[in-house]
């Protein structure tokens, strides 16, 4: 390899874009794993179409994968790509406006045929009409070279063309000075059963790398150094996988089988897929006939004493609502995971949104409070899943865990936890023996948690009935007594309030008080944290806080908010958390909202913060 | 069998299954008879009380769990089978009874009916069919006859009704039966038989709602005409009925008809012999209805198929042995790791 100039970069954001059939998700994931392996911090954002098979080359068929890799801690996949890899005209059309001015643009020029240009809505070929002069354009005949490379291996045209994503990947590896070996090993593992594919894909990968080496255009190597991550063993982790693992670990910590009743729905199905593979750890998954049956089976499993979990997305929660009310009434522990997507109705199935907060907190008939937790990042899903199970069991209540499409599919490095350090979960079943001579009162409560007595079928002598009709305060028998009803409503509400006694401290980053607190929840954490860090680096004294507990709120939350002159609440909805905060505390907050199916950009939060700070001064 | 704190299960009596709750159905309701027969039969099943669970949905019949002193769950409208399915997944040793009605089980719970039956969970499903909505005070149900005048169908029901037994056979249940609420000999024998069937057993009970649909079955179930208008299915026996047991069901190709033995050249050998192990025959016989035919009761279908919970447990065991000594820590760590510092 020729000697190259080396340019150090702090972080780079690349977006791979192509047709759904071009393997962009795979390419992005390989690049991410390699970057993580060599010590960068990484964050990813897969963005794929809802249509499974949109016509090849069409705009709706464009699939994208964005990755930011960096030598510092990062919390987002980057606001805008520095590099765009466009495998066809539609991919260019859809993504070019995001590319930073002066950014690098790698295109597969072979795909810029008349018909593809037409499909993408181009009248002129943008590679030739001078419209791309703002960018560093690299026209690469990826299909042609890939085909030439694999032809000697006996590959046909159709199969051969499919290797071109590895060519693109190899080329990017050259430009950003990454090793090929991890990908080659991966290819071996993935395609090991068909040696032809191993050979062809490896050849394409190397051809891409070598192409970079031969073409003079790439004589600068861009280096992104290792990030300073906490010492330990890391792996790449996405939110759905972390949720699945968290549930399995929680069940093991409770010494009970994990039951997961679910109905397929984007973007939650991967939790079902993963858990279905883990029967070896005693996991019982049940693919129900519909969302309601998924919820009903989860209640049945909870009644039987299992760690009972169901997962879905917003439309599914809507269908489950009545049964969630039953779970509240029966006071049985279970977790409902909502991997949020764009709504209402079918909405934007593959896009992200945080608009189910009201639904989680308020969306049931009657006075029906339950704890609501949200995970803020892919790896956080693991901790939140365990906390949700622990809380559900300890307080005998259904708990909603909110995730969203962005963190469900996004990946980041995860410091693998030592499972031995996780506290056991006590089921605390009532037994005849444990009860001694006392009468069995199924709704008698623990003084500290207000959790009711819980005996499971199979326990002799404690036979009893539960159900959705209002219960007597102690016996649990049906009661229509007006005072009893009010008392039960209050005690169920008070019980849910008490889960807050177990919350860990609020973790504010930045100054303890001051002109501005940026307060968020869920997946906006990444953009909010980066915004806070960037501004503080520039000497702006903002603080940021991401809350996990959406209902009930942390007991310190109000006092914390009141220590700042202004509170900015960015969220991917029309202001739901802002609304709840105002209602709860009669406090004024500034709302920053976005409902485009896309996560926040760091810059959007910085701009709004600066605007608030400048009006602050003007006053 | 687990020991029971109440003593050996053999000593259980009907009283052990009577809860302290006052039964609140309308006086004269057919539900009383069914409750009594089930309470009477439960002690003979050899199942410890603590392993019995009764789950219901919503409707008059769904109050049932409160009156039986076992574990019980009065759930929400139409969903009893979903709770029962989840419970069986996590504890297959329980004897789980689902109590439902024509509205609860076939209308709002129709989807769960179809899927729970085909999955063959080892559940005992008893559907109280009174052909009306009782709890909501008298609207047409999915089993109401076409033309029936109710509060919600003042000009007569337009819907073509569901035949629950037929639907259960079509949903590929492995045990399907039918009985009458006041048939004090036949009903308990059906309950006992279904309890011993491994896999889903579905029993339709014609239940009189004396408030909103009184006498809905009397045109064939009246004791005076019962022997002429109903037929008791008996496996391996010719399908005979009538005061003198001289009438029988004869097949012309696949078409059933009623014939009198000894008339028109029909001999006893021509009468169809019932075989409850044949789903096609069961389906055919389930079409027999008033007024052209005697209404069949008894065991329509009794076949074996592996249960959902056994197959699930099987997969868990296989996967566990395949896992070997791989720990949960190994799983969580994965194979693609890197080390920092
Ligand atoms: S309304 Fe009918 S079914 Fe309901 S309890 Fe009264 S008689 Fe029985």
Image (cartoon, coloured by chain):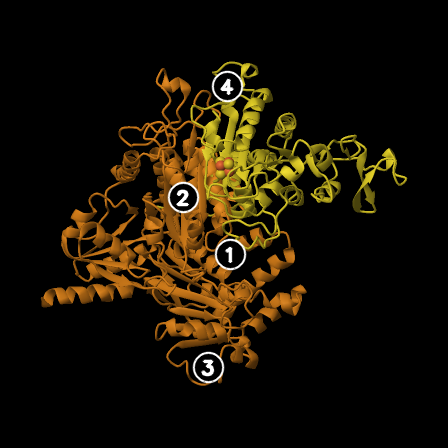
Please tell me whether mark 1 or mark 4 is closer to you in this view.
Answer: 4
Q: Nearer the viewer, residue A198 or B245?
A: B245
Crowd band around label 4 with a 10 angstrom C-alpha radius: few (<14), some (14–19), many (20+) = few
How far is the residue under mark 4 from the one under mark 3?
86 Å
User: Which class describes the residues within 10 Å of circle 2: few (<14), some (14-19), or many (20+)?
Assistant: many
| Inter-mark Cα distance, 1 to 4 | 71 Å
The residues bearing labels 3 and 2 have C-alpha atoms spaced at a distance of 54 Å
Q: Quadrant of residue A593?
A: bottom left
Residue visible at 37% across and 45% down in the picture: A400
- Label 1 belongs to which residue? A183
Left or right of residue A88: residue A155: right
In this view, the residue in front, A219 or A388, is A388
Quickly name the residue at label 2. Answer: A324
- Choose between B307 and A142: the one closer to the eye: B307
**x and y percentages locating residue A93 in the rendered image:** 45, 75
Q: Which mark is drawn over residue A37?
A: none
The colour of chain A is: orange
What's the mark number on residue A126? 3
Q: Is residue B97 left or right of residue A585?
A: right
Instruction: Return the disc, 3 or 1, that comes first in the chain's sequence.
Output: 3
């Amino acid at each position: 390899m020729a000697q190259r100039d080396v340019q150090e970069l702090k972080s780079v954001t690349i977006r791979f874009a192509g047709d759904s059939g071009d393997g962009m998700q795979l390419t992005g994931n390989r690049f991410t794993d390699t970057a993580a392996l060599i010590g960068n911090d990484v964050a990813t954002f897969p963005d794929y179409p809802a249509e499974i098979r949109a016509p090849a080359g069409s705009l709706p068929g464009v699939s994208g994968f964005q990755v930011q890799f960096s030598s510092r801690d990062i919390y987002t996949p980057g606001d805008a790509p520095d590099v765009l890899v466009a495998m066809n005209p539609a991919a260019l059309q859809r993504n070019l406006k995001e590319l930073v001015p002066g950014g690098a643009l790698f295109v597969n020029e072979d795909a810029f045929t008349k018909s593809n240009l037409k499909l993408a809505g181009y009248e002129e070929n943008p590679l030739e009409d001078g419209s791309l002069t703002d960018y560093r354009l690299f026209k690469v005949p990826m299909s042609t070279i890939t085909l030439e490379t694999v032809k000697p291996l006996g590959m046909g045209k159709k199969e051969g063309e499919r290797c071109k994503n590895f060519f693109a990947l190899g080329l990017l590896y050259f430009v950003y000075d990454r090793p090929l070996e991890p990908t080659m090993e991966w290819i071996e593992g993935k395609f090991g059963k068909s040696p032809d594919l191993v050979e062809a894909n490896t050849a394409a990968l190397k051809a891409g790398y070598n192409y970079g080496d031969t073409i003079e255009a790439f004589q600068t190597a861009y280096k992104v150094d290792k990030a300073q991550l906490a010492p330990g063993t890391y792996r790449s982790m996405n939110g759905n996988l972390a949720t699945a693992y968290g549930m399995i670990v929680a069940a093991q910590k409770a010494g009970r089988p994990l039951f997961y009743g679910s109905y397929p729905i984007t973007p939650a199905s991967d939790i079902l897929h993963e858990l279905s593979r883990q029967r070896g750890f005693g996991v019982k998954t049940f693919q129900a006939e519909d969302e309601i049956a998924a919820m009903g089976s989860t209640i049945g499993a909870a009644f039987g004493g299992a760690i009972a979990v169901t997962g879905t997305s917003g439309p599914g929660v809507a269908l489950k609502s009545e049964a969630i009310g039953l779970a509240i009434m029966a006071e049985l522990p279970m977790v409902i995971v909502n991997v949020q997507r764009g709504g209402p109705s079918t909405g934007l199935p593959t896009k992200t949104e945080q608009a189910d907060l009201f639904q989680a907190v308020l969306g049931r008939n009657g006075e029906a409070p339950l704890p609501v937790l949200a995970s803020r990042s892919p790896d956080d899903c693991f901790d939140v899943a365990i906390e949700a199970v622990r809380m559900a069991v300890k307080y005998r209540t259904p708990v909603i865990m909110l995730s969203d499409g962005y963190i469900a599919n996004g990946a980041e490095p995860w410091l693998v936890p030592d499972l031995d350090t996780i506290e056991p979960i006590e089921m605390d079943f009532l037994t005849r023996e444990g009860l001694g001579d006392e009468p069995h009162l199924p709704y008698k409560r623990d003084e500290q948690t207000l959790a009711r007595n819980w005996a499971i079928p199979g326990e002799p002598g404690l036979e009893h009935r539960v159900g959705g009709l209002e219960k007597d305060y102690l016996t649990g028998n049906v009661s229509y007594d007006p005072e009893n009803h009010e008392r039960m409503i209050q005690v169920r509400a008070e019980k849910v309030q008490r889960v807050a006694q177990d919350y860990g401290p609020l973790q504010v980053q930045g100054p303890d008080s001051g002109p501005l607190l940026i307060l968020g929840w869920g997946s906006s954490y990444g953009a909010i944290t980066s915004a806070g860090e960037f501004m503080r680096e520039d000497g702006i004294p903002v603080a940021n806080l991401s809350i996990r507990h959406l209902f009930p709120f942390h007991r310190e939350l109000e006092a914390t908010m009141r220590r700042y002159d202004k509170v900015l609440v960015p969220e991917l909805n029309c202001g739901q958390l802002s609304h709840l905060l105002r209602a709860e505390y009669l406090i004024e907050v500034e709302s920053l909202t976005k409902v485009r199916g896309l996560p926040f950009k760091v810059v959007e939060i910085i701009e709004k913060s600066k605007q608030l700070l400048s009006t602050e001064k003007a006053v | 069998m687990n020991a029971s704190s109440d003593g050996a299960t053999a000593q259980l009596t009907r009283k052990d299954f009577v809860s302290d709750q006052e039964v609140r159905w309308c006086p004269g309701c057919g539900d009383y008879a069914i409750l009594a027969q089930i309470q009477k039969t439960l002690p003979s099943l050899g199942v410890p009380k603590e392993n019995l669970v009764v789950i219901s949905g919503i409707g008059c019949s769904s109050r049932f769990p409160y009156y039986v002193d076992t574990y019980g769950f009065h759930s929400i409208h139409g969903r009893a089978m979903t709770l029962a399915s989840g419970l069986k997944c996590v504890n297959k040793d329980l004897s789980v009874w689902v109590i439902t009605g024509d509205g609860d089980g076939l209308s709002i719970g129709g989807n769960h009916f179809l899927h729970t039956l085909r999955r063959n969970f080892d559940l005992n499903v008893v559907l109280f069919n009174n052909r009306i909505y009782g709890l909501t005070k008298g609207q047409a149900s999915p089993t109401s006859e076409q033309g029936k005048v109710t509060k919600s169908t003042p000009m007569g029901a337009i819907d073509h009704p569901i035949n629950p037994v037929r639907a259960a056979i079509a949903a590929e249940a492995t045990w399907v039966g039918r009985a009458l609420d006041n048939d004090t000999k036949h009903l308990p024998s059906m309950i006992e038989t279904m309890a011993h069937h491994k896999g889903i057993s579905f029993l339709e009970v014609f239940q009189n709602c004396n408030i909103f649909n009184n006498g809905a079955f009397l045109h064939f179930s009246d004791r005076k005409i019962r022997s002429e208008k109903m037929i008791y299915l008996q496996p391996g026996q010719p399908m005979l009925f009538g005061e003198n047991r001289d009438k029988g069901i004869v097949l012309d190709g696949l078409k059933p008809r009623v014939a009198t033995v000894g008339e028109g050249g029909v001999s006893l050998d021509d009468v169809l012999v019932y075989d409850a192990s044949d789903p096609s025959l069961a389906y055919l016989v389930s079409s027999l209805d008033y007024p052209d035919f005697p209404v069949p009761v008894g065991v329509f279908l009794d076949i074996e198929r592996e249960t959902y919970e056994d197959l699930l447990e099987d997969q868990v065991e296989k996967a566990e042995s395949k896992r070997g000594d791989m720990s949960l820590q190994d799983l969580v760590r994965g194979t693609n790791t890197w080390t920092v510092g």
